[in-house]
Image (cartoon, rainbow, N blue to C red):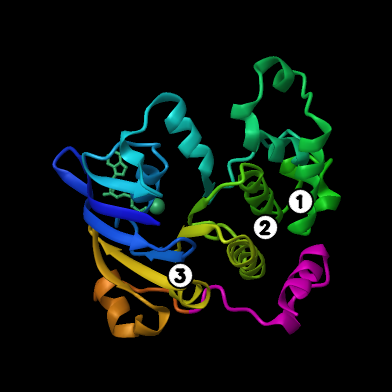
């Protein structure tokens, strides 16, 4: 159970996150939507302790997240994996090593420097890549992969940590519709099969409607909507995005028939049948 209570983050006079409160049951799949500058990224960074809150409390399974320091803070960061829009892989390093870097904080510097990984860890990394449909890419450099494949490597790296929570900051904003679908399907499947909580900042409404059990709308740092996809009507969306804003209803919709027949498309079909 996650409890967020009156969390505020000021930058100078401006509240990037303004008195935000909500609870998430053990394994919710929550989408956060809102226009650029609404405070979505700042909120995820607060949760992961990449930045500090000005005030408020976050508790996860009775742990006071915002008060953690040192080793406890690092332990939380490994339980609470982040996925970014730009993947944040090491481009010239092979895929399997990128995945193994998910457990870097458990390894000694020397063994990491020489890329010595215990067989069990290597097998685990390969099994995770296989689960995500990209085991055959394990020895390639990350930079040689398509964006959609790189984001799946980033998800694999997150899973290597065996996290309780996955925080995804616009995970599909750099991807074409087909790869966006594959990545969202992967996140949803991980949520459904493993019971991990997922909180994803999403830039399109239809993705939030399609994949999330619950959607939180932010505007100017505040929560202005918290409900189910059904309750997220076009009128509500106007409140969230502002009457003057255009918002994308269908940027990620795609037809299966239109999928090209490469490895990604095969993976997409397997996921969808
Ligand atoms: N490091 C920072 N320093 C100053 N202002 C920041 C910083 N990070 C974010 N902000 C401001 O906080 C607000 C929320 O930003 P952000 O969380 O990135 O929104 P979103 O992810 O919804 O686009 C914006 O006004 C942004 O300019
Ligand atoms: Mg952002």
* 266 falls in the magenta region: yes
Q: Secondary structure at mark 2?
A: helix
Question: What crowding class fits label 1: few (fewer than 14 Cα within 10 Å), some (14-19), or many (20 or more)?
Answer: many
Q: Are marks 3 and 1 in contact (CB under 8 Å)?
A: no
Q: CA distance from mark 3 to mark 1?
A: 27 Å
Pinpoint residue 35: horizontal percent, then vertical percent.
33, 63
Tell me if label 3 and label 2 are in contact, CB under 8 Å.
no
Q: Crowding at label 2, few (<14), some or many (≥20) Cα neighbours within 10 Å?
A: many
Q: Marks 3 and 2, how far apart in space?
A: 17 Å
Which stretch appears magenta?
250-273
- For discs 3 and 1, the disc positioned in front in the rendered view: 1
Q: Nearer the viewer, residue 40 or 110?
A: 110
Q: Earlier in the sequence, mark 3 or mark 1?
A: 1
Q: Which quadrant holds residue 94?
A: top right
Q: Which residue is mark 2?
A: 148
Residue 41 vertical position relative to residue 237 in the rendered view, above or below: above
The residue at 56%/73% (across/down) is 252
When the figure is inspected, residue 121 is found, relative to residue 149, above or below; the finding is above
Identified at 63% across, 69% down, the residue is 181
Q: Which disc is residue 204 wearing? A: 3
Instruction: Give the mark, 3 or 2, whose residue is nearer the N terminus.
Output: 2
Name the spot of residue 226 as percent of width and height, x first: 31, 71
- When asked about the image quadrant of residue 188, the answer is bottom right
Identify the residue under disc 1. Answer: 129
Residues 17 and 213: in front is: 213
Q: Secondary structure at mark 1?
A: helix
Q: CA distance from mark 1 to mark 2?
A: 13 Å
Give the side of residue 98 with respect to residue 25, left or right. right
């Amino acid at each position: 159970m996650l409890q967020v209570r009156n969390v505020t983050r000021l930058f100078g006079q401006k509240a990037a996150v303004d008195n935000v409160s909500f609870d998430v049951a053990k394994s919710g799949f929550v989408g956060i939507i809102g226009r650029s500058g609404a405070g979505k990224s700042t909120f995820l960074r607060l949760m992961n302790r990449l930045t500090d809150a000005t005030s408020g409390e976050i508790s996860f399974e009775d742990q006071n997240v915002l008060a953690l320091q040192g080793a406890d803070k690092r332990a939380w960061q490994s339980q609470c994996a982040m996925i970014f829009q730009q993947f944040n892989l090491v481009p010239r390093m092979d895929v399997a090593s990128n995945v193994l870097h998910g457990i870097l904080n458990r390894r000694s510097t020397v063994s990491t420097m020489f890329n010595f990984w215990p067989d069990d860890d290597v097998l685990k990394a390969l099994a995770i890549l296989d689960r995500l449909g990209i085991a055959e890419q394990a020895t390639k450099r990350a930079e040689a992969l398509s964006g959609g494949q790189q984001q799946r490597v980033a998800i694999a790296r997150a899973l290597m940590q065996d996290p309780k929570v996955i925080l995804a900051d616009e995970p599909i904003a750099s991807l074409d519709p087909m790869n966006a679908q594959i990545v969202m399907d992967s996140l949803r499947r991980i949520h459904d099969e493993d019971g991990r909580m997922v909180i994803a900042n999403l830039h399109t409404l239809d993705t939030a409607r399609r994949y999330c059990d619950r959607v939180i709308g932010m505007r100017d740092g505040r929560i202005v909507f918290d409900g189910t996809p059904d309750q997220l009507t076009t009128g509500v969306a106007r409140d969230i995005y502002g009457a003057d804003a255009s918002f994308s209803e269908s940027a990620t919709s795609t037809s299966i028939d239109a999928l090209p027949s490469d490895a990604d498309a095969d993976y997409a079909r397997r996921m969808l049948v």
